[in-house]
């Protein structure tokens, strides 16, 4: 596998989730495939909870890529299908963490990633 800038961000974020936030390796999936509008897509990082439900979707971009509304739209489309509780977008330099508010159909920005419970 070639270590692209995006892959570098992904590998570092996985290490952060495991080392700093204490998420077990067994609950973290990389490049999990899903189908949206008959098109195959892949999540960069998908974290499950103890019950096996989708807990966190992480979208990784290369450090040179600015995080825009389009990036959030992409991860939001994935979450229409996956129904994860948290969305994270990172380019390794900027990180945005959101908790889903399904009742009000919006997301709430957080200061940091929640620790594994």
Image (tube, grey):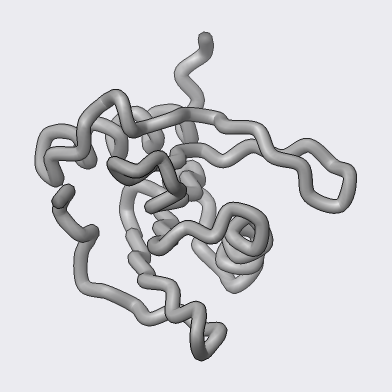
| Residue 20 image point, x, y percent | 10, 42
In the picture, measured across the screen, residue 115 lies left or right of residue 103, that is: left
The residue closer to the viewer here, 96 or 79, is 79
Q: Residue at x 38, y 29 (%)?
A: 8
Q: Is residue 14 above or below residue 99?
A: above
Q: Is residue 111 above or below residue 29?
A: below
> Which residue is the extreme one toward the front?
51
> Which residue is the extreme one toward the right?
38
Q: Residue at x 44, y 80 (%)?
A: 101
The residue closer to the viewer here, 69 or 56, is 56
In the rendered image, which quarter is residue 94 located in? bottom left
| Residue 16 image point, x, y percent | 20, 39
Q: Is residue 6 above or below residue 80?
A: above
> Which residue is the extreme one toward the bottom?
104
Q: Residue at x 35, y 43 (%)?
A: 51
In the picture, measured across the screen, residue 44 lies left or right of residue 20, that is: right
In the rendered image, which quarter is residue 29 located in? top left
| Residue 19 image point, x, y percent | 12, 34
The residue closer to the viewer here, 27 or 61, is 27
In the picture, measured across the screen, residue 35 lies left or right of residue 108, that is: right
In the rendered image, which quarter is residue 32 located in? top right
Question: How many marks do you count on the picture?
Answer: 0
In the picture, measured across the screen, residue 73 lies left or right of residue 48, that is: right
| Residue 59 image point, x, y percent | 49, 49
Q: Residue at x 65, y 33 (%)?
A: 33
């Amino acid at each position: 596998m070639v270590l692209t800038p995006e892959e570098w961000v992904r590998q570092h974020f996985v290490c952060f989730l495991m080392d700093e936030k204490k998420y077990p390796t067994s609950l973290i999936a990389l490049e999990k495939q899903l189908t949206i509008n008959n098109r195959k897509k892949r999540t960069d990082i998908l974290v499950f909870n103890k019950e096996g439900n989708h807990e966190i979707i992480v979208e990784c971009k290369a450090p040179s890529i600015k995080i825009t509304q389009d990036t959030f739209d992409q991860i939001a489309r994935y979450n229409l299908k996956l129904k994860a509780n948290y969305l994270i977008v990172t380019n390794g330099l900027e990180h945005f963490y959101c908790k889903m508010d399904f009742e009000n159909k919006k997301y709430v920005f957080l200061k940091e990633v929640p620790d594994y419970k």
